Image (tube, rainbow, N blue to C red):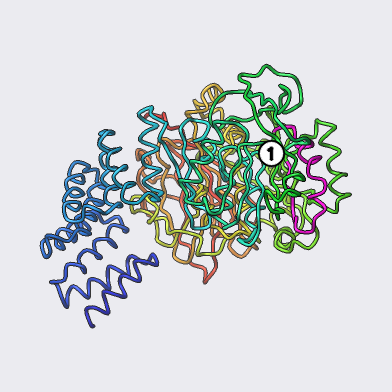
Amino acid sequence: DHADANHLLGVIAHQVGDHGAAVELIGKAIRHDPSTAAYHCNLGNALHELDRLDEAAASQRQAIALNPDYSKAHNNLANVLLAQGCSIDAVASYRKALSIVPDDAEIHVNLGTALHELGRLDEAEASYRKALALDPDYARAHTSLGNTLQETGRLEDAAASIKFEGRDLCYHTPNRMTKWRVDSFFTKEPDTIRWISCMTDEEILLDVGANVGMYTIMASVGRGLKVFAFEPESQNYSLLNRNIYLNGVSDLVTAYCAGLSDHSGLDKFYLSNFSLGGSCHAVGESLDFNLIPQQADYVQGCTVYTLDEMIESNAIPVPTHIKIDVDGFEHKVITGMQKTLTKPEVKSVLIELNPHLEEHRGLFQKMEELGYRYFESQAEESRQPDGAFAGIGNVIFYRKGWAAYEDLYGKQKGPVLVKASFNHVMEKIKQAEIISDPTPHFFIENVFPDNFYQNLLTFLPDETSYIPINMTGKTKGHYSPSRSILAFDNESLSKLDGTIRPFWNLMANQLLSPDLIFALVDKFSHWLPEAGAQKEDLAMLHCEAMLIRDIKKYEMGPHTDTHDRVASLFFYLPKDHSLESAGTALYKPLDENFHSDGSRHFSFEDFSEVDRFPFKPNSLIGFVRTDTSYHGVPRFDQGDEVRNTLGYAVKNLKRTR
């Protein structure tokens, strides 16, 4: 019953996510010693995580009463007030905290967030800039400042950050193209991320066509590699160096304002567009990525070299890995590095290949003759399925013996063709029979190809990758603490183990694409007003996906979902048939006049169960949100079994009642 011991145990419980235990333990400490401000402050933090905001605010105020100069309590009280929607009061509390510790960068960012909520964007900007003056590497401050500058239309100083293997990768985002490159980082080229994740800090990467440095920064900051980056376009080269400086990796990265090709000398560089982050430019003649003549937007001078010449002159060392992305001219770069590719130090070469070009088709044989091989599944998954770049994709050629890369593919137990598997899913949805009572829904078995489903189960993350849903801010306290989720967003996916991250990046790329949105809206078109306008106004439709992990004692009362929900899918992912009774159930209220706006979950006693979907392996349920779409999960209480589900929802952000 020692107060300090109970307090310490409570803090540990809070840190590992057991906030209920934290409240109990710190409460014991306070009963023995109610005069220690830190106890009340940490109790308030645990209560905040449980969404018990009034109690959390009271605890922080008690801490302040005991120690008026306790800056953490003032900051934490402001956090609670902000969560309660009391932004003006939150600003006052943050300012009080800063009057005590004026050099705390985190509190300056928190103050900026509150000011942003109030629409006081100039003051928010000043707070973020103050935080960066105190801590120039503070990723959250860069991202918050970037978002504010974008809202005010002043993009020149904007920046954004993403997490990769626990490290912050920061990028300047002075226009929409550079911001898009950050936002699409984990879904645009997941094979490139998979490839770089296999590298070690003892290796050297050559980035040919580095653009603004998306992968240069990832390799240097995220993996500790030494990188030599080549980018001849003047604006991109400038921003590439700004990103190197922003991330503090000038000791690891050397950037050259030059191109690599099949010859050396001065040349002309034809730009398809004169903008930061632009691409599809050409050395020597104005051609597009299909090597078809095009009108250049601007022509600049540039210097080009062959890699062989640079290696022979000792200008740069022999690289371990080479990335080549030069929009159709990859074959010329390869021609200029024939000697280098024979050197044993080179383990792999990633080349963006266009199968429409004879020059590119010949590179497969050329690389094989040089002793390189590739995985057909990797090449297939990388190809763009449609659009202007249809068929184009990265092919990773590697030398036998690069164990990290070979082991990664060995663990995949054969080709994991995510795109092909989702075509199978789309066809299954198209053919599914809709049952209209009590709400439009369908149930599909064998939704994925069998081999793919077995592979998917091997890629399920362990429990440490999930976050209790009550800690995510996505709920208002009516979810069981027995449910944890892994959201399909950049930050969450970046924390996954490197051996499974590429697979879930590919899954996210498919799930979050417009194709699945359109398929669901088409399927339920009879019940959805969005059906007629879906492709004319895609911006109104938004989708989200997450892996869901339910353990013993989980239950979810009947509810309809909020009004902005359009439709939902739940992919059931059990390993066998032992949990068939644990599926989602459909309900009708006992009171025929009962109506809900979807914001609450209700008691099972007030509803009758109409149907229950069997929780079978490789099955899918789908339903549209209506005023009668009451669904829930009866208490799940079957030993130590885990209920794994992949959830997907389409929302209309413009829906009104």
Camera-side residue of 78 and 195: 195
Against 43, residue 227 (above or below) is above
- The answer to whether residue 60 shows anywhere in this view is yes
| Residue at x 73%, y 23% (from the top left corner) | 285
Place of residue 119 in the rendered image (x, y in percent of width and height, measured from the top left): 27, 33
| Residue at x 72%, y 42% (from the top left corner) | 394
User: In which image quadrant can residue 384 be found?
Assistant: top right
Query: Is residue 406 in the magenta section?
Result: no
Place of residue 379 in the rendered image (x, y in percent of width and height, measured from the top left): 76, 45
Place of residue 112 in the rendered image (x, y in percent of width and height, measured from the top left): 28, 42
Camera-side residue of 498 and 349: 349
The extreme front residue here reads 313
Q: How crowded is mark 1: few (under 14 residues within 10 Å), some or many (20 or more)?
A: many
Place of residue 481 in the rendered image (x, y in percent of width and height, measured from the top left): 40, 61
Q: Quadrant of the C terminus?
A: top left
Label 1 SS: loop
- The answer to whether residue 424 shows anywhere in this view is no
In the displayed structure image, the side of residue 524 where residue 74 appears, left or right = left
Q: How many marks?
A: 1
Q: In which quarter of the image is the N terminus?
A: bottom left
| Residue at x 60%, y 42% (from the top left corner) | 509
Camera-side residue of 485 and 174: 174
Q: Name the residue under label 1.
A: 325
Against 40, residue 89 (above or below) is above
The extreme top residue here reads 295
Report the magenta residues as a range: 327-351
Specify the amino acid type for callout 1: Asp
